[in-house]
Image (cartoon, helix red, strand yellow):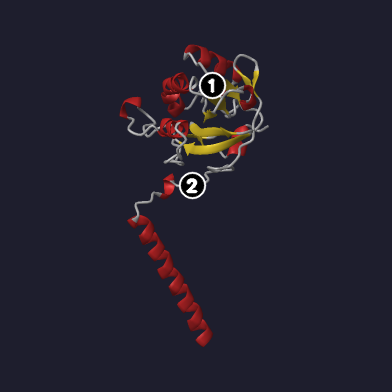
Amino acid sequence: MKKKLTIVGLVLALGFLGAALAKQVKARGINPEKQNISFGRFAVGDEVSDFKLKNVDGKMVSMSDFSSAKGFILVFTCNHCPFSKAYEERLVQLNGKYMSKGFPLIAINPNDPEAYEEDNYENMKKRAAERGFTFPYLVDDKGVAKSYGVSRNPQAFVIEKVGTKNIVRYIGAIDDSPKSEGLVSNKYVEQAIENLLVSKPVVTQNTRAIGCAMSWRSN
């Protein structure tokens, strides 16, 4: 009986401790969704692996091709998703603003073309031409998105080059208005890059990507 009471007391104590910690987090104004949380295989601060994927111009592209880059904006996106379509012009703008500052944008389409014909390679080429993409638009037939832990289209990664390593500095949404550019109040990707350009820590490191669920390729 005494042993049973001791266990009950321990459980109650742990419960009170958890509640106290939760109260302290709330009091400090911490938002757990914007802290150093891993939403997949890679987390902020991790070194990410490079890739070599086919671009819509038929050439193979990897991060190592950009020898003078300070980092990268990687956006996993696709053709068919309404959220991805809503960001197309914003991706062009991001690349136009930051490519010359050392942070080129690379878009990668991981979706299964058998599930969505609109996402096949030929339609990727058409979409890139129609929308005036100024950045590589790569077909992910090697499971890169899975290795990065991508959960939604679109989802962004801000990568910083540190020596020979590519380090994740931000994961999540491009901004806080997935449907309308006119309603944007927080430009998460831009804020992250602006921090890096002046050698400051990225303030908002994680947000939750909002978009279409992934349709993984079978290969």
Callouts 2 and 1 close, C-beta under 8 Å: no
Q: Is residue 17 left or right of residue 27?
A: right
Local SS, label 2: loop
* Quarter location, residue 26: bottom left
Task: Write the residue at 47% across / 15% down.
Answer: 131
* 117 over 2 or under it: above or below: above
Q: How far across and down, in percent of the image, does residue 88 sit?
A: 45, 22
Whether residue 194 is visible, yes or no, is yes
Q: Is residue 193 left or right of residue 139?
A: left
Q: Is residue 205 left or right of residue 45?
A: left
Task: Write the residue at 56% across / 26% down.
Answer: 109
Q: How far across and down, in percent of the image, does residue 27 sit?
A: 33, 57
The amino acid type found where label 1 is placed reads Glu
Which badge, 2 or 1, is on the more N-terminal residue?
2
Which residue is at the far bottom?
A: 1
In-front residue for pair 79/48: 48
Task: Write the residue at 42% across / 41% down.
Answer: 203
Mark identifier at residue 200: none
Q: CA distance from mark 2 to mark 1?
A: 35 Å
Residue under circle 2? 36
Mark identifier at residue 118: 1
Which residue is at the far front?
A: 199
* Quarter location, residue 163: top right
Which residue is at the far right?
A: 219
Which of discs 2 and 1 lies nearer the camera? The answer is 2
Q: How far across and down, in percent of the image, does residue 146 sit?
A: 61, 37
The amino acid type found where label 2 is placed reads Asn
Q: Residues within 10 Å of mark 1 (few under 14, many from 20)?
A: some
Q: How far across and down, in percent of the image, does residue 134 sit?
A: 51, 16
In-front residue for pair 1/170: 170
Q: Quadrant of the C terminus?
A: top right
Whether residue 153 is visible, yes or no, is no
